[in-house]
Amino acid sequence: MFVIFLVIGSIVCFLGRKLFKPVLFIAGVLLSVCVIWLLFYSTFLKENTHAWVGWVVLVCAILFGLLIGAIFVKLAKLGAFCLAAWGGFSLGLLIYNAFLYHINSQVGFWCFNIGIALIFGILALCFFDHILIHSTAIAGSFLFFQGIGLVGGHYQNPFTLAEERAQGVVVNIDPLFYAYLAGTIVLYGLGVFAQYRHKRADNDKGHDPYERLR
């Protein structure tokens, strides 16, 4: 997962515009796997569940994700909405981890993050070029440092934090998380810069990767 997160995070962050269709496909796969994983782990998958069950769920989620990724590429507007929503959701998780983790409500956690995701998704349908650049830069940089956090530690899982706060557990954010946050912001800025350079180059060549969305 460390390698996958770093590779995919880098591609999405820096090449989200240039490789629009492949990134749509990647978004479909990742979002499907994450949603299925969250649903199954919040229902019947527990710590004492046999390992093979988890692997079966993961393989089935990936296969389903491949289908969703293909649909995103075929229905580009739907894909663009979900891609932008992914960026908005990632931003919401960062804000929650950094500042809003004191909220002791899982409903508030989900409403906040899904609300930002929907705002980004709707904005992408109106201002797709700029919103998709910023959304992919955010999602990619978030995923990149999530991967580093998997092996480096000190990067607390926002879903776990929300669950603990809902149970009344007093939690404190590891100070090193803010180093991850700073790195995420820097990488996001570099991704935006790179993608706007691609945009300028595409304009000079008369190439429009978002042609199907206009």
Image: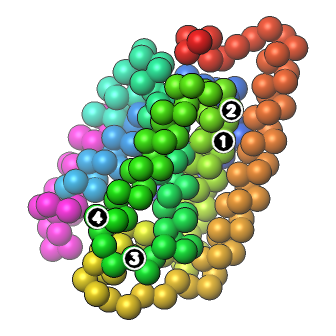
Quote the CA–CA distance across marks 4 and 1. 27 Å
Question: Which residue is label 4 attached to?
Answer: 107
Quote the CA–CA distance across marks 2 and 1. 6 Å
Where's the C terminus, which quadrant?
top right
Which residues make up the magenta segment?
Answer: 41-63
Q: Position of residue 173 (x, y in %)?
A: 52, 83
Quick check: 22 above or below 165?
A: above
Q: Position of residue 55 (x, y in %)?
A: 25, 53
Quick check: 30 above or below 177?
A: above
User: Image quarter for residue 106?
Assistant: bottom left
Q: Residues within 10 Å of mark 3 (few under 14, many from 20)?
A: some
Which amino acid type corresponds to the residue marked 1 in the rendered image? Answer: His
| Chain-order first, disc 1 or disc 3 | 3
Q: Are marks 2 and 4 in contact (CB under 8 Å)?
A: no
| Chain-order first, disc 2 or disc 3 | 3
Quote the CA–CA distance across marks 1 and 3. 27 Å
Which amino acid type corresponds to the residue marked 4 in the rendered image? Answer: Val
Q: Residue at x 26, y 48 (%)?
A: 36
Observer-nearest residue: 89 or 52? 89
Drawn side of residue 135 relative to residue 179, left or right? left
**Label 1 element class:** helix
Viewer-nearest of discs 4 and 1: 4
Q: Are marks 2 and 1 in contact (CB under 8 Å)?
A: yes
Q: Are marks 4 and 1 in contact (CB under 8 Å)?
A: no
Question: Which residue is label 3 attached to?
Answer: 103
Q: Position of residue 27 (x, y in %)?
A: 47, 37
Question: Which residue is label 1 attached to?
Answer: 134
| Chain-order first, disc 4 or disc 1 | 4
Q: Are marks 2 and 3 in contact (CB under 8 Å)?
A: no
